[in-house]
Image (cartoon, helix red, strand yellow):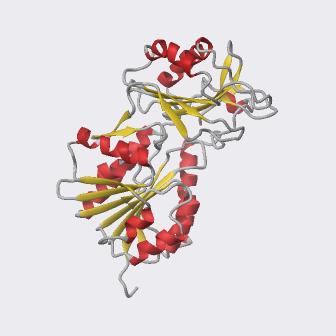
Amino acid sequence: MTRCAYFDAGQCQSCGWITDDDADQLARKQTQSAEAFASIYDQQPQWLAAHASAPEQMRNKAKMAVAGTLQEPSLGLLELGQAPVDLSDCLLYTDELRSYFPIIKAFILRAQLAPYDPTQRRGELKFVLLTQPWPESPLMLRLVLRSKEALDRIGKHLPSLQAQLPKHSVVSVNLQPEHKAILEGPTEIVLSEDRWLPVQFNQHQLLFGTQSFLQTNSAVASALYRQAAQWIDELAPTSVLDLYCGVGAFAYHASASTRRVRGIEISGEAIAAAKAALTRNGQPSIVFCCDDAQTALSTGKSPDLVIVNPPRRGLGEKLCASLNRCSSPAVLYSSCNLGSLQADLKRLTRYRANRAQIFDMFPHTKHFEILVLLEQLPINH
């Protein structure tokens, strides 16, 4: 069992299962998943052993609310009516990630970035978003501000900050002017020379923009992509359609010399990053398109394999209906929400889950990732 001083003191309850034994947490997630599948199928899929996470130092990103004063800023939790909690010593972050918090606090003072006070509606700096995919790799630092008022001061002191960060790190300012519980706004100003954050997953190097999605647990994400690649190679499809492809993690792991892969994503930034990574990966036969998943699935010939990695809300009724109408022999579904996955599997009446595996992306919480391989049933089923 993992002990956390913040949890024991009642200061942070984010890791609601942390008092449970690590093995018991994983068994509980497996049981919940099996029960969800039992409500759909009369026979369970082949379950591979759940992939566990390290219990500590596994998170690659920190989303820290800024509170306190210029002289003593706090990075962590801030709830109205309660004292701020500085989470700089959270055991979920690597030692190296934690080592940057004092550097950032010193920069806050030098650049005179007054912490935003939501009760008084004064101050500038709302959040610090720090991401380092692997130890000793470049990182991404995003400062969420209320306005552009501090941009000149940030620019003046930026060189001294960058000198203390790994080479090729990305630094940006996000503008979130509204007095709402919203983490970030739509406007991003990249301050560093480097725009993309390089992230190595297995043999592939991906690129991430400031608003691209990155799995929060790099080691478990690597295992997820490796398992997906293994199942795909066993299926040996000649054509693959990757919906919700993001920056291309599944698409790159699906690539092969004899395989055509098409990645679809609605985010223009993510598609730009996915295309920029092509040259870093030997120009595989992948085409990335900025498009809607529904439109992409409904046009053209059905591929041999469809990969779906939707947001927490899942695929929904309309897209599931389109999958049922297509003639793709298999669907590879990666889900971070057991509830929406269960709803989608019930809708996918032309398919049956044959194999599944849990990846414990979020230890000490009720959340986890599931990878499911579905194969199409005979038409007369």
Residue situated in front as seen by the camera: 4 or 361: 361
Q: Residue 26 or 236: which is nearer the viewer?
A: 236
Left or right: 21 in relation to 200: right
Residue 100 on image: x %, y %: 52, 20
Is residue 57 shown left or right of residue 249? right
Outermost residue, left direction? 258
**Farthest right residue?**
81
**Residue 186 visible within the image:** yes
- Measuring from the top left, give residue 110's x and y in whole percent: 59, 11
Of the pair 46 and 103, the residue shown nearer to us:
103
Q: Residue at x 50, y 31 (%)?
A: 189
Q: Nearer the viewer, residue 92 or 129?
A: 129
Q: Quadrant of the C terminus?
A: bottom left
Q: Give above or below for 70 relative to 289.
A: above
- Horizontal side of residue 187 vs 116, given as left or right: left
Residue 374 shows in the view: no
Q: Looking at the figure, which quarter contains the N terminus?
A: top right
**Residue 119, position as x, y percentages in the image:** 80, 31
Q: Is residue 201 above or below residue 294?
A: above
The tally of labels here is: 0
Residue, x 36% and y 64% (percent of image)?
306
Q: Quadrant of residue 70?
A: top right
Q: Quadrant of residue 195?
A: top left
Who's the residue at 75% across and 34% down the image?
A: 79
